[in-house]
């Protein structure tokens, strides 16, 4: 399965497994991956996982979606692409995409992953911390 690898300032890596079909990302609580950052739009982007390829599409976000430092509207993702949404940077890992027989099932309306970004008022402050549920 394809994944996003998100590395925190402290060096911890959060692994996000993408499921077949659409994986929504944004600040709003109904997204599959919720980003707690004022720089992210409520509905920021969607990553679509198909049997043969994976794409990312910006959903008209104010601050844009970037792949390998290029602002995109829609982009095919390849292994090791860097994705930037708001203050977050993730690395795409293609993984094994032979999963067309797997049926995606939404078991909860809760987001799969909530990322919290501690912001400082000082623009020269060190990079903000990113935390996942259950992690300080």
Image (cartoon, helix red, strand yellow):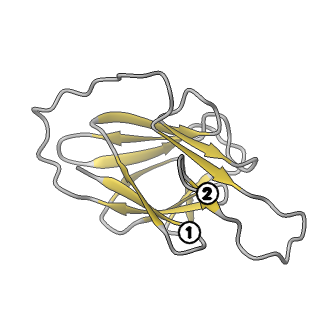
Image spot of residue 67 (x, y percent) = 49, 61
Percent position (x, y) of residue 56?
43, 47
For mark 2, what is the residue?
Answer: 136
In the rendered image, residue 50, in percent from the top left (x then y), is placed at 24, 40
SS class, disc 2: loop
What residue is rendered at 86% in x and 71% in y? Answer: 123
| Position of 13 relative to 24 (above/below) | below
Q: How many marks?
A: 2
Q: Nearer the viewer, residue 55 or 31?
A: 31
Nearest the viewer among 113 and 44 is 113
Mark 2 burial class by Cα count in 10 Å: few <14, some 14-19, many 20+: few
Which residue corresponds to the image point at 89% horizontal and 70% vertical from the top-left? 122
Residue 58 spot, x, y in % from top left: 54, 43
Report the side of 116 relative to 121 (left or right).
left
Q: Residue furthest right?
A: 121
The residue beneath circle 1 is: 69
State the quadrant of the C terminus.
bottom right
Q: Secondary structure at mark 1?
A: loop
Q: Earlier in the sequence, mark 1 or mark 2?
A: 1
């Amino acid at each position: 399965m394809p994944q996003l690898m998100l590395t925190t300032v402290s060096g911890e890596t959060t692994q996000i497994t993408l499921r077949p079909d659409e994986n929504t990302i944004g600040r709003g609580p109904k997204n599959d991956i919720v980003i707690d950052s004022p720089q992210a739009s409520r509905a920021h982007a969607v990553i679509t996982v198909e049997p043969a390829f994976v794409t990312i599409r910006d959903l008209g976000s104010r601050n844009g979606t970037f792949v390998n430092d290029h602002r995109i509207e829609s982009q095919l993702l390849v292994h090791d692409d860097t994705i930037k949404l708001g203050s977050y940077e993730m690395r795409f890992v293609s993984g094994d995409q032979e999963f067309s027989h797997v049926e995606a099932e939404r078991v909860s309306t809760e987001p799969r992953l909530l990322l919290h970004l501690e912001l400082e008022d000082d623009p020269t402050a060190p990079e903000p911390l990113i935390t996942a549920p259950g992690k300080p």
